[in-house]
Image (spheres, helix red, strand yellow):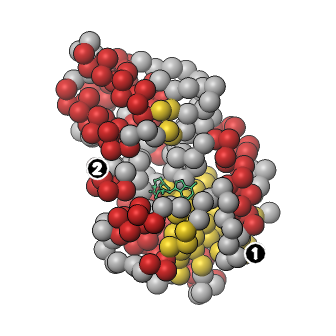
Amino acid sequence: MASQWGLFLPPARPSLSELSVLEKILLGQKQKKPDLKVATLGSTPEYRDLCQTYQINYKCLDYNKDNFLTLRNYLLHKDKDDNLLLSDWREMNFEETFDVFMGDLATTVTLVKDHDIIYQNIKKHCNSKALFLLKVVLREDNDIRAHKEIFSKYRKELFYLNPFAAVWREVLLADYDFTEDTMYCPVSLKKLKESFEQSIITEYEFGEYKKRWDALGDFKMNIPLRQNFLGKLSKYFEIQDIASGNDWYKEHAPIIVSSIE
Ligand SMILES: C[S@@+](CC[C@H](N)C(=O)[O-])C[C@H]1O[C@@H](n2cnc3c(N)ncnc32)[C@H](O)[C@@H]1O
């Protein structure tokens, strides 16, 4: 995924309007504490550029140095190797503490069963009054929608967007494993191929997913139920605001602003 970052589109990476929400919050925090220390969950280039634009100290918490280095190629302002804090979010065996943790789909790419330990670890490394800013994609119910319905909505209402961007969340939920609370890219690819072979989706629609699912390979993502997700998060943090960018998908992709209690 890191080497093909350019293939990914919001909501699968930060949008400009989401960055503008984060920019406002970060600047507000920096005004109160000029030596603000930010930790990004992962090596998201847009977050690194945002911090560098305002000379905000930041570390990328990532367990994969190659991803950190590869994603540097997408930065406008190149950063340094010591901007990486090599660590697994499920462990975080280091001393450093931060004023802001921020993540774009960080919990989306980690198993739901690991979310508790990740929140506990973040909390341990928070300075007083720290904020946790997390963009996440959520579902409202366990209804299953078929590709036929999803792509006919795409062609009627969202045709001006790339199909990967437009119905990414719906496609992830089309063959969701509600027991394990996850989707699995190889299963999604297989089901999309079947729909293409049955002429339910077009070659273009299939191709836009195939190239990205091929880039991700053996990868799982979760779209948890809103109430479950917020319930678990609020065991560890106080939710201050459910913000969002201004994108067409904003209702399903909040930026949750929480603080340590
Ligand atoms: C946060 S994510 C999801 C996409 C995201 N927008 C990004 O930053 O790339 C992917 C990044 O997180 C890292 N990552 C995933 N799981 C991790 C974990 N348990 N601990 C530390 N880093 C992890 C990956 O190595 C990758 O660089």
Q: In the image, is 137 to the left or to the right of 233?
A: left
Amino acid beneath label 2: Leu
Specify the farthest residue to the top: 198
**Between marks 2 and 1, how big is the CA–CA gap?**
38 Å
Q: Which residue is mark 2?
A: 7
Name the secondary structure under disc 2. Answer: helix
The numbered mark at residue 207 is none
Amino acid beneath label 1: Ser
Q: Which residue is mark 1?
A: 128
Q: Residue at x 67, y 46 (%)?
A: 114
Quadrant showing the C terminus? bottom right
Q: Classify mark 1 as within 8 Å of ligand 1 or not, answering yes or no.
A: no
Residue 189 or residue 30, whichever sits in front: 189
Could you say which quadrant of the image residue 255 lies in?
Answer: bottom right
Residue 76 visible (yes or no) = yes
Q: Residues within 10 Å of mark 2 (few under 14, many from 20)?
A: some
Residue 46 visible (yes or no) = no
Could you say which quadrant of the image residue 130 lies in?
Answer: bottom right
